[in-house]
Image (cartoon, rainbow, N blue to C red):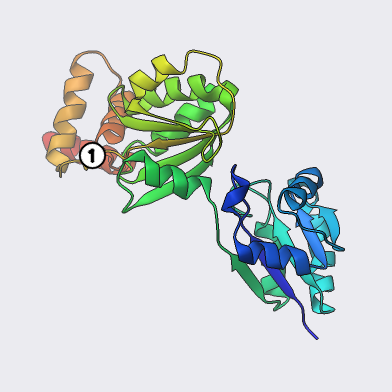
């Protein structure tokens, strides 16, 4: 007899958001694989659930090692429920490797939808949600963070980030440096909890707001870039020439024009090279 693996979304702050189906599955589970076993016990207590399930500690560092055993237990007919500390497993949380193992073993995987900090922040942000990307946590170091943001500079989709409260102001400063001070953004703090805050403004305004002690869970939503106008290789060459005339190296000028226009650096280089060859012929 084959069992079943469930990925179950849990409340992101307000336990009242737990679904009746989540309660049913947690009550009937043989194993609850939890990102933090202590939080799992607290969730069960808050939901008034008494369970005979084994509760496994299942965090990032042990996911790969423990996944085969969990899949084996499902194959023996048991019900395994995977939960993260909050929200949906595998979304910037453990769960991805477990699902991969299950698919490889032809084990049925079901999902219990529910609370999501990503979708909640998008919905309340007031920014466009027809197209968006989830970028997880930004790199910890400023240089790496700015490089990451430069790769997103021309992305027209609304972007969602998680960030630790003690790094929020530094991340906002780097986002402002790359995206510009006028890019719209929203800080969502402690969503669904007692002290929930939603702060909307430009990146410059949010940098000023965040220069204080900040506590709690942070989800940051940033507007996408305005679509760039169509440009031609002739225009790329002219812009590079303008930069070179004021003292930039050709290499730096090509890189800057490519970044500003959102076109591949190689294409700009090829256009400049072709123009130089044409002048010599």
Q: Is residue 255 above or below residue 115?
A: above
Position in image of residue 242 (x %, y %): 16, 22
Q: Is residue 141 visible?
A: no
Residue assigned mark 1: 226
- Looking at the picture, does residue 214 appear above or below residue 95? above
Q: Is residue 63 left or right of residue 216?
A: right
Farthest front residue in view = 48
Q: How many marks?
A: 1
Whole-percent x, y for residue 57 in the image:
82, 50
Towards the viewer: 269 or 210: 210
Q: In the rendered view, would you say 172 is above or below 37?
A: above
Q: Residue at x 51, y 13 (%)?
A: 212
- Closer-to-camera residue (175/119): 119
In the displayed structure, does residue 41 sit left or right of residue 157? right
Q: Nearer the viewer, residue 164 or 42?
A: 42
Residue 32 appearing in the image: yes
* Residue 100 occupies quadrant: bottom right
Q: On the rendered image, what quadrant is the C terminus found in? A: top left
For this view, does 109 lie left or right of residue 61? left
In the rendered image, which quarter is residue 29 located in?
bottom right
Residue plotted at (28% across, 44% down): 267
As drawn, is 75 to the left or to the right of 238?
Answer: right
Q: Position of residue 208 (x, y in %)?
A: 40, 14
Helix, strand or loop under label 1: loop
Q: Where is residue 126 shown, x and y percent of the image?
A: 31, 40
Residue sitting at x 12%, y 34%: 279
Mark 1 is surrounded, within 10 Å at the Cα level, by few (under 14), some (14 to 19) or many (20 or more) other residues, namely few
For the N terminus, the image quarter is bottom right
Q: Give the answer, above or below, for where 188 lies relative to 124.
A: above
Q: Residue furthest bottom?
A: 1
């Amino acid at each position: 007899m084959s069992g079943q693996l469930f990925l179950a979304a849990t409340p992101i702050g307000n336990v009242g958001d737990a679904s009746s189906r989540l309660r049913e599955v947690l009550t009937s589970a043989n194993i609850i694989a939890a990102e933090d076993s202590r939080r799992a016990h607290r969730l069960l207590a808050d939901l008034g659930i008494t369970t005979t399930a084994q509760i496994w500690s299942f965090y990032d560092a042990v996911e790969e090692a423990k996944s085969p055993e969990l899949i084996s237990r499902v194959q023996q007919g048991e019900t395994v429920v995977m939960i993260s500390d909050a929200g949906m497993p595998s979304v910037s949380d453990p769960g991805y490797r477990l699902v991969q193992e299950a698919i490889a073993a032809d084990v049925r995987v079901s999902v219990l939808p529910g609370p999501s900090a990503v979708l909640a922040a998008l919905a309340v942000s007031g920014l466009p949600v027809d197209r968006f990307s989830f970028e997880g946590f930004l790199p910890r170091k400023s240089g790496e963070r700015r490089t990451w943001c430069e790769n997103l500079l021309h992305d027209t989709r609304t972007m969602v980030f998680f960030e630790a409260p003690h790094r929020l102001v530094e991340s906002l400063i780097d986002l402002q440096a790359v995206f510009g001070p006028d890019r719209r953004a929203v800080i969502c703090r402690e969503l669904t909890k007692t002290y929930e805050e939603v702060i909307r403004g430009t990146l410059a305004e949010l940098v000023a707001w965040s220069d204080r002690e900040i506590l709690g869970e942070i989800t940051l939503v940033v507007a996408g870039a305005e679509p760039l106008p169509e440009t031609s290789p002739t225009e790329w060459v002219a812009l590079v020439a303008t930069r070179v005339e004021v003292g930039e190296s050709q290499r730096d000028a090509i890189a800057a024009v490519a970044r500003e226009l959102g076109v591949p650096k190689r294409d700009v280089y090829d256009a400049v090279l072709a123009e130089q060859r044409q002048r010599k012929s």
